[in-house]
Amino acid sequence: MSGAGKGDGEGGHGEFASAGILEAILESASQSILAVEGSGEIVAANARVEEMFGYRPEELVGEQVERLVPDGVRERHSAERQAYFRAPKVRPMGEGLELRARRKDGREFPVEISLSYVEGENGPMAIAFISDITHRKTLEDQLLQSQKLEAVGRLAGGIAHDFNNLLTVIMGYDEMLLGQLSPLSPTRGYAEEILKAAERAAALTRQLLTFGRRQIVRPAVLDVSEALGRTEGMLRRLLGENITLKYCLAPGAGKVLMDQSQLDQVAMNLLINAREAMTGGGSITLETNAVELDETYARTHAGVKPGAYVQISVSDEGTGMDEETQRHIFEPFFSTKGDAGNSGLGLATVYGIVKQNGGDIWLYSQAGVGTTFKVYLPRVDEAADEEAAKKSDMGPMRGAEKVLVVEDEEGVRSLMCDVLRRSGYEVLAATSPQEALEMSRNAGGEIDLLITDVIMPGMNGRELARQMMAKRQGLSVLYVSGYTENMTLRHGVLDADVNFLQKPFPLERLLRRVRETLDNRR
Ligand SMILES: Nc1ncnc2c1ncn2[C@@H]1O[C@H](COP(=O)(O)OP(=O)(O)OP(=O)(O)O)[C@@H](O)[C@H]1O
Ligand SMILES: [Mg+2]
């Protein structure tokens, strides 16, 4: 580079001007360095430009600097350049300009430019230090995305919680109504429609809770390949005939601590999307592998902790996605399938589940070629817990025990009391934990079962249970909630010995859980 003179940033120590030192600096710099005249002409460039822009330095000398920016930015760049030369000053790194740049092959990338200037033969000359900031931008972007999803998740979870209370009441009383209407009653159809709509609303609410990572789960140690193998038949039927579904389940892919129904949900949502992207048929591959994510991987993927993971990947040969679509796919209600009746909750659900389980999800997609989703779940080393898949049997659903129901939502409380009384139980109802403690004192400790909401003003259900159990050893407890806060149940994860009923619930499930809880008493 020629013409190195003095800018206002002078005042260094010793002598840099010797050709040897300058040469060494220019050639070892990780930045592209350009000297540009006021006219926009490049008068010198260091060797790094070749790697960054694809031009050899001598190709650039004599060219307009705007050649290195994309069409859409050219005018702005030229205006800024002229403004800079009217009052040149040093703009160090960190206060530099962020711009899009363009390579010789047309590819664009983000750069940060810091500027200095010197007096050249034809007036001031700008020295531009150009850094490729693709990597930093990607990480910033990833972080921003995950913060946005986090915020939307909190909102969705909160709404879902309130909806659960309302739906519990709507569904419960509607079921009672149906129970009293004769099969021939003309109003029966109305009540059935209400129940159907409420069930749809409950399903949506469940998905929102999952996205908000508030779904209540019973994690067990699962061998991922075995667990996915168990649902293979069901998923094949679901995907239909004109799709080739390849399962490559590595036997040693590893185990994870997770609720099997959540794992199924992840696989199902990804497979359905893959099928929906391949209207003309084709093949989908579901694969499992044991992987180690190292520091290098973690540095390029925001939020990933290095360690051992089970990788589940789902690849299709479908439509693929452009970059704009890829930015939004995990947001709830984002869907490009407008008229097909899709809600846009599929990937939001997957995202919530993966994050709730300490995992990560990434995608690689190219429009017109296909898409691969990669899910990473933290690997655990314990023995697989096959008990978890077993379901409890249905026993008789009635009883005569004394039950205390604590619930601050009036509608839910009266519904539960009504149902329990009809099934033979002796029922006490309290609107708050304080009232419950008083009732339990007055009842002389004769209560068999406490049914309590988890989150209530004043005292949470867990604390209430603890205080009551201190007075009465054999007391059984059934927790009821729409979701759970980590203070009570650790991030929505239930201890194995906790009896729990999620709102909204069909009345039959309430009665069954009550019976189970009472019968499992020691
Ligand atoms: N495998 C894929 N190939 C191409 N596009 C996909 C793929 N998976 C997801 N997408 C895009 O991401 C969007 C969001 O997916 P998501 O599963 O969340 O919603 P949906 O499938 O549209 O609706 P729902 O899952 O609720 O039925 C889709 O509308 C689609 O544009
Ligand atoms: Mg979907």
Image: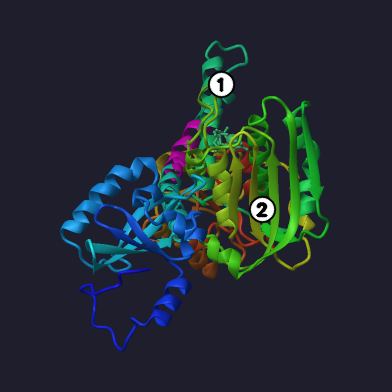
Front disc: 1 or 2 = 2
Instruction: Indicate yes or no whether the magenta region holds residue 163.
Output: yes
Identify which residue, 247 or 354, lies in the foreground: 247
- Identify the image quadrant of the C terminus: bottom right
Query: To which residue does mark 2 refer?
Result: 259
Res 172 seen here:
yes
The residue segment tinted magenta is 160-172
Say if 449 sits above or below 308 in the image.
Answer: above
From the top left corner, tell me how far across and down residue 94 is, in percent.
32, 66
Residue 337 quadrant? top right
Query: To which residue does mark 1 refer?
Result: 192
Say if 315 sits above or below 304 in the image.
Answer: above
Q: How many marks?
A: 2
Q: Residues within 10 Å of mark 1 (few under 14, many from 20)?
A: some
From the top left corner, tell me how far across and down residue 4 is, in percent.
30, 72
Q: Are marks 1 and 2 in contact (CB under 8 Å)?
A: no
Mark toward the start of the polypeptide (1 vs 2) = 1
Residue positioned 45% across, 42% down in the render: 160
Residue positioned 43% across, 38% down in the render: 411
For the view shown, which residue lies furthest in the bottom direction?
A: 14
From the top left corner, tell me how far across and down residue 473 is, in percent.
60, 67
The rendered magenta stretch, by its main secondary structure, is classed as helix
Q: What amino acid is at disc 2? A: Asp
